């Protein structure tokens, strides 16, 4: 019988396989081309899939419990009399500076790369490849934030239920990083903040404390939209895309046409019409529309079903985990994957304003596929070591509960 971690791995491979096939189908430029096995095996997306699977396998073998023992150690000096009120911010300065510098590289000369007016990429200086390889720093920060916030929650566990000592430092950290991402990418910034809030709430922060920040968050969202003309146009197009069908509403109309055109069983793999110059970003953010058009409701339901199975299995792994750091990190991975998928599906089907955010493990991506697969590989590693973590003498021994009496000698 398959272990949950193995189910996670199979779901990742299934989604990547669908992604490779559909990216190549969406990449057809003339009707005479086809999606042949040779074309699939030699495509760039196949190489990225191989790298993503390799990254997942590497992550699944990492000694996650030793890492948890190091990063998850609580700070017992937080409750002593006279402890600084905002001492939680002190050890968040280093990751904050690191993340901001990494995000700022997209604006640096030479290595910064602009695509369609958006500064989201940096070039990888690999000789002989030119501009062929690039990476999104926001993608790296998105997954790194999970570990940083989980680390903060474990260190501040004793005071996390307090407003000023517990919640505020963590929320300020997540908010600053998210605001810096929002400058270039509203969707990813909102995703990072939402995932961080899920981890903070699960770690013990009080929900009514969060409620006090809701007006501030809504005001920040409104400011981010109003100060960007193209975001305002997208919101107006969402309300009525047919008011400007050749302009701001074009993208949403073409996406909904692709979704509706597939009906129940689709037009057939490779036989979609919207990809021939009608639907923009058909290989990336709007690939799910091509899935609906060519594979129909049945194919779309299969993709969503695999995503739901992946999320459900991941939550089962998190529920069984007893180590706080690993539990919070696993929850953050699943929350990030799930929220990102929901945003993409809502945008593609016309239930949310047009936003450039990919469907995890399906939409074309290099660094996105690799980092997502690596993160889910950590979830596999957590499951792989769960049954062994209680065995005394194992190479990854169980963590002792703080304050518990030592285990008797064998």
Image (spheres, rainbow, N blue to C red):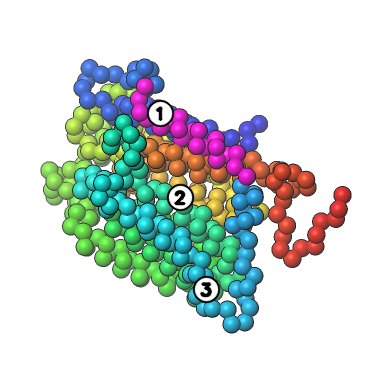
Residue 292 appears in the figure:
no
Residue 118 appears in the figure:
yes
What residue span does the magenta drawing correspond to? 42-63
Whole-number angstrom distance, CA of label 3 to CA of label 1: 46 Å
Marker disc for residue 143: 2
At a point 56% along the width and 55% down the height, the residue shown is 328
Marker disc for residue 87: 3
The disc, 2 or 1, on the residue closer to the chain's N-terminal end is 1
Residue 20: image location, x then y, percent: 38, 29
Q: Secondary structure at mark 2?
A: helix
Q: Which residue is mark 1?
A: 47
Whole-number angstrom distance, CA of label 2 to CA of label 1: 22 Å
Q: Are marks 3 and 1 in contact (CB under 8 Å)?
A: no
Q: Is residue 158 above or below residue 263?
A: below
| Residue 45 colored in magenta in the image | yes
Whole-number angstrom distance, CA of label 3 to CA of label 2: 25 Å
The disc, 3 or 1, on the residue closer to the chain's N-terminal end is 1
Q: Secondary structure at mark 1?
A: helix
Residue situated in front as seen by the camera: 96 or 21: 96
The disc, 3 or 2, on the residue closer to the chain's N-terminal end is 3
Residue 387: image location, x then y, percent: 70, 43
């Amino acid at each position: 019988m398959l272990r949950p971690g193995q189910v996670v791995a199979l779901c990742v491979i299934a989604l990547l396989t669908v992604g490779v096939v559909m990216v190549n189908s969406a990449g057809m430029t003339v009707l005479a081309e086809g999606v042949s096995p040779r074309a699939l095996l030699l495509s760039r997306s196949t190489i990225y899939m191989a790298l993503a699977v390799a990254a997942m396998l590497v992550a699944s073998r990492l000694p996650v419990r030793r890492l948890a023992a190091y990063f998850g150690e609580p700070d017992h000096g937080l409750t002593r009399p006279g402890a600084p009120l905002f001492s939680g911010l002190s050890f968040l300065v280093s990751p904050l500076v690191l993340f901001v510098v990494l995000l700022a590289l997209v604006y640096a000369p030479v290595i910064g790369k602009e695509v369609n007016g958006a500064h989201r990429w940096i070039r990888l200086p690999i000789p002989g490849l030119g501009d062929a390889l690039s990476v999104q720093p926001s993608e790296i920060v998105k997954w790194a934030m999970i570990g940083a916030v989980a680390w903060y929650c474990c260190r501040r566990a004793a005071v996390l239920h307090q407003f000023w000592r517990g919640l505020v430092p963590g929320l300020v950290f997540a908010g600053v990083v998210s605001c810096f991402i929002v400058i270039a990418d509203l969707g990813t910034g909102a995703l990072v903040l939402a995932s961080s809030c899920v981890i903070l709430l699960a770690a013990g922060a009080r929900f009514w404390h969060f409620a006090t920040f809701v007006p501030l968050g809504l005001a920040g969202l409104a400011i981010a939209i109003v100060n960007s003309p193209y975001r305002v146009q997208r919101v107006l197009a969402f309300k009525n895309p047919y008011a400007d069908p050749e302009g701001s509403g074009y993208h949403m109309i073409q996406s909904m046409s692709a979704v509706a055109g597939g009906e129940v069983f689709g037009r057939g793999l490779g036989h979609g019409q919207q990809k021939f110059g009608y639907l923009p970003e058909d290989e990336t953010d709007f690939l799910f529309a091509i899935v609906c058009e060519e594979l129909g409701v049945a194919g779309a339901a299969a993709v969503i079903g695999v995503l739901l199975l992946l999320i459900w299995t991941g939550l089962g792994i998190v529920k069984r985990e007893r180590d706080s750091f690993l539990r919070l990190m696993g929850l953050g991975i699943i929350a990030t994957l799930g929220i990102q998928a929901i945003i993409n599906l809502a945008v593609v089907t016309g239930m949310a304003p047009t936003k450039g955010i990919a469907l995890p493990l399906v939409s074309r991506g290099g660094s996105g596929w690799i980092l997502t697969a690596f993160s889910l590989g950590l979830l596999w590693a957590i499951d792989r070591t769960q049954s062994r973590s209680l065995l005394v003498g194992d190479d990854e021994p169980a963590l002792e509960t703080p304050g518990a009496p030592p285990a008797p000698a064998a």
